[in-house]
Image (cartoon, rainbow, N blue to C red):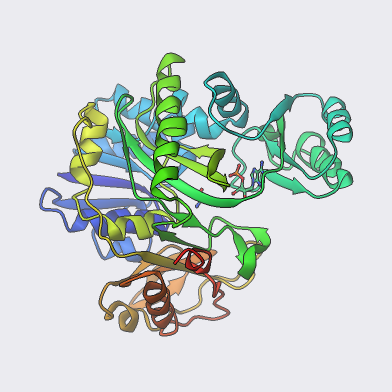
Amino acid sequence: MKVLIVGGGGREHALAWKLAQENAITKIFTAPGNGGTSKLGENVPLSTDDIEGLSEFAYDQWIDLTIVGPEAPLTKGIVDLFNEKGLKIFGPDKAAAQIEGSKSFSKNLMKKYNIPTADFKEFTDPDEAKEFINRIGAPVVVKADGLAAGKGVIISRVIKEANDAIDRIMIKKEFGDAGDRVVIEEFLTGEEASFLAFTDGETVIPMASSQDHKPIYNNDEGPNTGGMGAYSPAPVVTDEIFDKIMNEVMIPTVNGMKAEGAPYTGVLYAGLMIKEGEPKVLEFNARFGDPEAQPLLQRLKSDLSPVLLATINGNLKGMTLEWDDRPSVCVVMASGGYPEKYKIGKEIFGIDMANEMKDVVVFHAGTSYIGKHLNTSGGRVLGVTAMGADLKDAIDRVYEAVHKIDFYEAHYRTDIGAKGLKYV
Ligand code: AMP
Ligand code: GLY
């Protein structure tokens, strides 16, 4: 089977790494890919937004299966386009991808189907939004309705900040059309977790739990990023909470999407806030998480390609996934300055030494080869990922691997996984 992976981050390298180990896979293309994926197959110089170009490539190359990493091509309708051409592709279609592409859509879906989430109201008029904020007070969360590369959520501790957020989103249009509408919601406290599942629109097969670390600095300080590290499983998700998430969130959401005439197939990812044993949904994503995919795929013992195909073909019923019992921890090494301005083109040293360690995989994100030299080419550069006998051991081992790697102004958090230690 020839596969095409759309994307160029750590998630896509992890997908390629997993698929490369499977007998059914004969060739892996990644578009645009990175230094890591270039060693597992062929990188294709097409952008993830060029859905026409990607579909032509898949058609010309007789690609058997395309897997979409990021959200933007999904909300643009890459799945609809591939389906029109009779090409197999993994991910939700445009209508179903709204669950990530529109906060208003997902909040209203949750309200209608009683899926636990923060109370909210939506506005298209900035004055009415501000009046509402002044009435309910701070802390409060302001969200641009559309996709804003993870930056459209503004948590405001004081009313002035929330009103400024309305100006930025709705008047200055910092996120373009994504800010035509805002969702204003209750500020939730608790511990966050990520819950991903495969679904063919009927059956929901959960993955192991995981937890992201969004802020740039230790102790969750500083601005949010795409994610500075993740680990799996997340002990905050006890067996009881796991079942609750399946019964109160994942299954009702998949059923609700079907009832709305937008049946969902692919990976459904719920970002959750958990407090006193009760999960509430912060957001849905229409794809694998990044970095969550890195520790999850390291732990997945079952082959991935049969699950992807069963999801597309509506055959998930009865399928089970086997996981390595050992925890996996992924530490993101980023370019200095990320998530703001950063430099690229800096040589990376020591990856081979880290990869020599048993049960350590260095996933590439923003890297590219210039001749034999591996250079940085993005904000998040590497996802160093390690399994260990227990969480403490996995953390020790991943940082041992991180310490073998170096590039100019490399920045990483030193507390990835620490939140999980309080449970053991
Ligand atoms: P989202 O893109 O909606 O997941 O929001 C990004 C991040 O903002 C989440 O991972 C949370 O850390 C935070 N966040 C979003 N909504 C809320 C909320 N209602 N209360 C507290 N924090 C939130
Ligand atoms: N790790 C957060 C995300 O993939 O959206």
Image quadrant, ligand 1: top right
Relative horizontal placement of residue 338, taking residue 240 as reference (left or right):
right
Q: Nearer the viewer, residue 202 or 222?
A: 202
Depth check, front residue: 372 or 233 = 233
Q: Position of residue 329 (x, y in %)?
A: 40, 66
Whether residue 409 is visible: yes
Tell me which residue sits at (21%, 34%) in the image. Answer: 310
User: Percent position (x, y) of residue 170?
Assistant: 78, 34
Front position in the image: 39 or 151: 151
Q: How many marks?
A: 0
| Quadrant position of residue 215 | bottom right
Examine the rendered structure and indicate whether residue 171 appears above or below residue 288.
Answer: above
Q: Position of residue 292 (x, y in %)?
A: 42, 55
Measured as percent of width and height from the top left, residue 379 is found at 55, 64
Please report the residue visible at 37 percent of the width from the left and 78 percent of the height from the top. 397
| Residue at position x 36%, y 65% in the image | 328
